[in-house]
Image (spheres, rainbow, N blue to C red):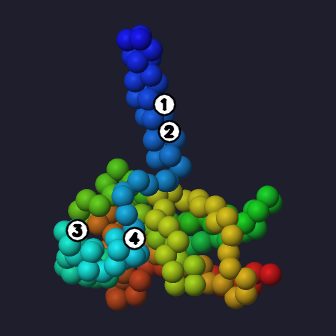
Amino acid sequence: MNRTLSLFVIGLVFGGGLGFAIAAGNGVTFDGHDHADPSAHGGAMDHAAMGHGSDHEMMHDTPIDLPAANAPTVAMELTDDPMAGHNLHIITSNFAYAPQQASLGHTPGEGHAHVYINGEKLSRVYGPWLHIASLPKGEVTVEVTLNSNDHRPLSVNGTAISASTTLTVD
């Protein structure tokens, strides 16, 4: 019985660790909740009750305005996936993805991207590629923004560092 229990625990430790390593290597995050969706906390009031007060909420909306010299840039390519959906390639310069620094303080030149579909946040991304399984029918705008480790949007001269494209989905 002890041997079975020991093997079970060893399997959980190594199996779970391998799963998390694979997920992290593919840009998947496990941060517990999505700040863009107050309903994930039972509404805005519950969000404040969880220790995420209005200062925390406002931080996500307060851009970090960077000097134009050596500021990060972002471009994107959205292509049909041969199997299904679309592949989004996020092309950056002067910027490094830093999943290990998620939710920590701002460090110039690093952070993550946010992907929006028709203005609604789809995902936080820690790498240059994202598969989008499906898009809504009709005219669709896909936007990518660059964000600091602490989730604030990055901007230059008050303009968000972002890229977008609009397509028609049948």
**Residue 40: image tag:** 4
User: Does 84 sit above or below residue 114?
Assistant: above
Mark 3 or 1 closer to N-term? 1
- Please give the residue where the numbered disc 1 appears in the rendered image: 15
Q: Residues within 10 Å of mark 3 (few under 14, many from 20)?
A: few
Q: Say which quarter of the image contains residue 35.
A: bottom left
Callout 1: SS: helix
Tags 3 and 1 touching, CB below 8 Å: no
Q: Nearer the viewer, residue 72 or 77?
A: 77
Q: Amino acid at mark 2?
A: Gly
**Residue 50: image tag:** 3
User: Does 43 sit above or below residue 113?
Assistant: below
Q: Residue at left 53%, top 49%?
A: 26
Q: Is residue 56 visible?
A: no
Mark 2 or 3 closer to N-term? 2
Tags 1 and 2 touching, CB below 8 Å: yes
Disc 3 versus disc 1: distance between alpha carbons? 32 Å
Mark 4 or 1 closer to N-term? 1
Disc 2 versus disc 3: distance between alpha carbons? 29 Å
Residue 151 percent coordinates (x, y): 33, 69
Q: Say which quarter of the image contains residue 69.
A: bottom left
